[in-house]
Amino acid sequence: MCSYEDISKQSFELALRLAATKLSSMKAEELCRNSGASRIDDDRIRIHYLNQSYQVSISTGEISLEGKEENVPVKDQILILHYLTQANGTPFTNKVITYGQIGGGKFYVPVFIKRNIDPLLKSFSHRPELLFDLAQRIGGTKATYGDVSISIDAFPKVRIFFILWKGDDEVSPNGTILFDGNVPHYLNSEDVCVLTETLVWKLVRMA
């Protein structure tokens, strides 16, 4: 649970095939309205994911990164297709929830902490300002939680908050990751964990 790396190649292919089949039954207007994507033509839409633009074929589920020839990793393809097919247009709530409050997430909170919060703290707890500087490069903006916090719209309607407390002589630095309350309307708990892990390690590598 909580990492596509744990899934076999056959399961990857099945997940992609099922998501692509579901996408093929949907209309561009519906997808754009619910997900925040933009329509290119009857078969193609454009979706922003982690501050980059991707084109998606509705009929085939094929995904390409705009302006680049590189292949889109399977993990990212699955996330994009799951987001598009599960989106229902629910607006941001401007209230935050924990990973454990996402359906099914409470059973995997220890895994979420190990794969997301622990590496975030290891890399940034003693240099929280660096987290803010790096996050700005991928579309992050300042938030109002903790001593240093940022919000990143991983998808047009999925907002993730990275929060750090600096600590002092008596209290160790700490941190957490929260989500806008609308996230269950776009991704399930496994997808949320994988998405967060992708974003955390993007920031860690940048550091």
Image (spheres, grey):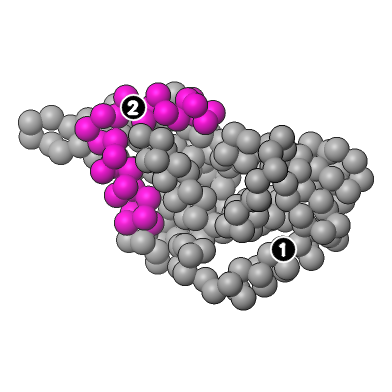
Asked whether, in this view, residue 81 is left or right of residue 28, the answer is left
Which quarter of the figure is the C terminus placed in?
Answer: top left
* Residue under the point 61% across and 58% down: 74
Give the residue type that dot 2 points to: Leu
Mark 2–mark 1 Cα distance, whole angstroms, equals 37 Å
Q: Circle 1 — which element?
A: helix
Q: What are the residue bounds of the magenta stretch? A: 112-141
Residue 134 inside the magenta-drawn segment: yes
Location of residue 1 in the rendering, given as x and y in whole percent from the top left corner: 45, 68
Location of residue 87 in the rendering, given as x and y in whole percent from the top left corner: 69, 50
Q: Is residue 36 visible?
A: no
Residue linked to disc 2: 130
Residue 74 higher or lower than 1, as above or below = above
* Residue under the point 24% across and 40% down: 174
Q: Residues within 10 Å of mark 1 (few under 14, many from 20)?
A: many
* Residue under the point 53% across and 44% down: 181
Disc with the residue nearer the chain's start (2 vs 1): 1
Residue lying at the far left in this picture: please name it. Answer: 169
Residue 99 inside the magenta-drawn segment: no
Residues tagged 2 and 1 counted as in contact (Cβ below 8 A)? no
